[in-house]
Image (cartoon, grey):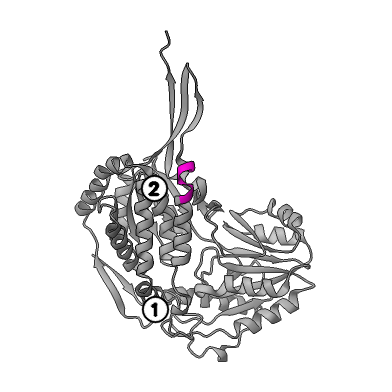
Amino acid sequence: MTVKCISPIDGSVYAERPTLSADEAKKAVARAQAAQADWAARPLQERIDLVLSAVAKVGEMNDQIVTELAWQMGRPVRYGGEFGGFNERAQYMAQIAQDSLAPMVVEDSDTFRRMIKRVPHGVVLVVAPWNYPFMTAINTIAPALIAGNTVVLKHAAQTLLVGERLAEAFHAAGVPEEVFMNVFLDHQTTTDLIAARAFGFVNFTGSVAGGKAMEHAAAGTFTGVGLELGGKDPGYVMENADLDAAVDTLMDGAMFNSGQCCCGIERIYVHESLFDAFVEKATALVSTYKLGNPLDAETTIGPMAQVRFADGVRSQIAEAVAAGAKTHIDPALFPNDGGAYLMPQILTNVTHDMRVMREESFGPVVGIMPVKSDAEAIALMNDCDYGLTVSLWTPDVERAEAIADQLETGTVFMNRADYLDPALCWTGCKDTGRGGGLSVIGFHNLTRPKSYHMKKVTN
């Protein structure tokens, strides 16, 4: 069997790789298991230095990577790739590693030494997605390796070159091949390995259906599973918001990467006093976008990763319009619309009875509704199966925090959106999944506590 990357640029096969057989996969994981103890025995600073050296080598490849990403998943080259966020996250996790992984000493007296150490799980399987393929992968790879785990990376077929680039960088930096390996696996082999307790921990970023499959595979094994799944993230623009800033940030959050972001803005609630002005400004801004070949420097919005993804969003929009929604973006401005190339769209006259306001779109469309009060906005924001991020717009910090306390979500932003702060736990609730990445909590999730209760011999 092979995995293929079909380029959204022109529908061609951009890359193709054979998958490992079941026996080859077992042997690869066995090598990672055998290498783990020696890796964990290395000094922490040595592991940190090796990871940071690998990160720097990824930066040296960036020009090549930017073009490869355009071919693989359609992001315009004008945005320069992901190295900024990739590096920021790895650097932060390296910075906090000593403190995060230090023993928690309860007592060290003449009588007792009592403490809790953080010890690695063993082999960590990272199943990474295609939409932000470097940044999502490093969220787990860097802290997992720093903490003393070995890592097996299974990347998405849509971005299958990313795993190879990461492996190239880590091995060139001096990380042994058995400590960090990139593998191509089919779904059944992956399932069988998890079910056979081949891994100490599994981190999956992807769809809700994929997350359920991971949980089913791990059932009864007691293997820890971190799930970072979908989102239907809302923005709430209050009557005292900076309107221009809200429009600029929320529209970027909705449309960047062709809307293919788990924490992208997919629904917006605007106080009725600002509603008309918000829609007018948002429409004017989105109407300036340039849909086209991502290799063209003038392109601001590229194709979606696959034609079927674009068709799914088209279906949501068509259903909403048939039910009374109003479109605001003129199709004449986007002559390249078709296939994987999907023009952006803003909808009003939407309700939560419509799929476009209820199910994840993962595309360049956003619905906007007027609200009369904070209570109405809170109810609408919570009326969702997902809980990843929320973006609140007001200069009033206390009001925003009071609203945030009532929201069912993983992260609350005020006056910003669609950003992952590595000092804060990246987490979610409801169908967005469970667990948490980055921050000190990310280290804790990639290790287990081990207690030491040592009674000293006294004369």
Q: Is residue 69 magenta?
A: no
Dot 2 corresponds to which residue?
146
Percent of width and height locating residue 272: 78, 71
**Could you tell me which residue is drawn at 47 percent across and 66 percent down?**
84
Circle 1 residues within 10 Å: few <14, some 14–19, many ≥20:
many
Specify the segment rendered in magenta. 95-100
Q: Is residue 329 left or right of residue 432?
A: right
Q: Secondary structure at mark 1?
A: loop
Residue 176 vs residue 356, the one in the foreground:
176
**Quick one: label 2 or label 1, which is nearer the N terminus?**
1
**Mark 2 to mark 1 CA distance (whole Å):** 36 Å
Question: Amino acid type of disc 1?
Answer: Pro
Circle 2 residues within 10 Å: few <14, some 14–19, many ≥20:
many
289 lies above or below 219: below
Question: Amino acid type of disc 2?
Answer: Ile
Percent of width and height locating residue 429: 56, 52
Q: Is residue 96 magenta?
A: yes
Q: Is residue 319 left or right of residue 39?
A: right
Dot 1 corresponds to which residue?
8
**Could you tell me which residue is drawn at 73 percent across and 52 percent down?**
402
110 lies above or below 271: above
Query: Is the stretch drawn in magenta largely helix, strand or loop?
Result: helix
Q: Is residue 245 left or right of residue 252?
A: right
Tell me, yes or no, if residue 252 can be seen here: yes
Residue 358 position by quadrant: bottom right
Q: Report how many numbered discs are placed on residues in the image.
A: 2
